[in-house]
Amino acid sequence: MKKFTSIKGFNRVVYLPRLGKIRLGVLAVSEKTGKSYPREEDYFICPPEVQAIYGEKSKRIDIMFPSDNPEVIMPYCYKLYGDNNRLKCKGNGEEAVYYDFQERKWKEKTCPCELLDKGCSIRGHLMVILPRVSLGGVYQIDTGSGANINRVLDAIRYWKMTVGRVKGLLLTLERIPEKIANPDGKMIIHYLFKFGCDLSAQTLNMAIEDTKRIMAIDYQVESPKEDGELSDTPIVYVDEENGENKINNIETESEILEEESEILEEELEILEETEQNDTDGLTKFQKFLIAMDEIKKELKQKFGDEAGEKIYYKELKTRGFEHANQIKIRDEQVAVYT
């Protein structure tokens, strides 16, 4: 009897599976309130097999790009997530697809829409091989930083011009501290990508000569995981009294305003007391400014300097003022507290 061990015309491409995820931050949980928020770290948070090679808090890893196609190496677009990190919508700046929960299917719409920067933001997934860990798959590194995405795309362009390819080229990836402007214009330190190469000129010349052979190797890369909670998300517990990331412990703007309202009610009592006492030589307007300064101090103490000032001036703006000394009418001064 004949043995059949293959099918004529059946073509199969080598498949590189996704081996795991490398994170850029952790989920911080307040010991006081139990509320959680994402917190950026200055090192790579790696799975155990990667830590076995690079240590627990490595800031530098060896990588290879699994493809020459930027859309495979770093797919990115606008994304909107819902509960349990479920993807609700994604788009490219012209068109998008969103999930209709009533009809339970994906539909098309224009992009961007009114939700941009209101939950919807840029999201990229860097796919890399870690040659010192395994050549049998890729690791996924998610980033919401436009600066990081640009650095990946710049590295791809540079090494293509230098060597003729990026696929299979041994590179290094580091996280370095840099100040970049947040949407409000304030400079904040973030830990961004930096690509490098430790190969000598002789080795790079050999890589150039080997380009044709490397590019002839055909394999597919497993697509990045876009949504769904992962059970291995690292969690750290933080003490709010240390003043770290205090504003992030408030989950929604309504909760911020609720906290702020409680503080304003307390300061109203201070204002009422100053109105009844004119024996200290201060005018009512001076006392009002003192009371407003106390509000600002209280907010900064409760939420941190930057967040406290933001809440303070936001409240003034909602009432049509930039600064407290612009509020001259007594009724308007009292109204600030109510």
Image (cartoon, helix red, strand yellow):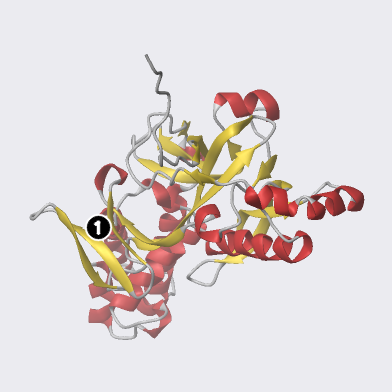
Write down the quadrant of residue 186 in the picture: bottom right
In this picture, residue 47 sits left or right of residue 213: left
Q: Tag 1: residue type?
A: Ser
Residue 23 in view here: no
Q: Secondary structure at mark 1?
A: helix
Residue 39 higher or lower than 322, as above or below: above
Q: Which residue is mark 1?
A: 254
Identify the residue at horizontal 61%, vertical 40% (top origin): 129
Q: Is residue 195 left or right of residue 140?
A: right
The x and y percentages for residue 33 are: 34, 36
- Residue situated in front as seen by the camera: 212 or 39: 212
Whether residue 323 sits left or right of residue 14 in the image: it is left
Return the x and y of residue 227 as percentages of the image width and height.
34, 45
Q: Residue at x 63, y 27 (%)?
A: 51
Figure check: 319 above or below 41: below
Question: Looking at the picture, how far across and down is residue 283, in whole percent?
Answer: 39, 78
Q: Estimate the x, y position of residue 142 in percent, counting from the top left.
A: 49, 48
In the image, is 38 to the left or to the right of 69?
left
Neighbours of disc 1 within 10 Å: few (<14), some (14-19), many (20+): few
Residue projecting furthest to the right: 202
**Which quarter of the rendered picture does the C terminus lie within?**
bottom left
Q: Is residue 193 above or below residue 30?
A: below
- Front-lying residue, 81 or 7: 7
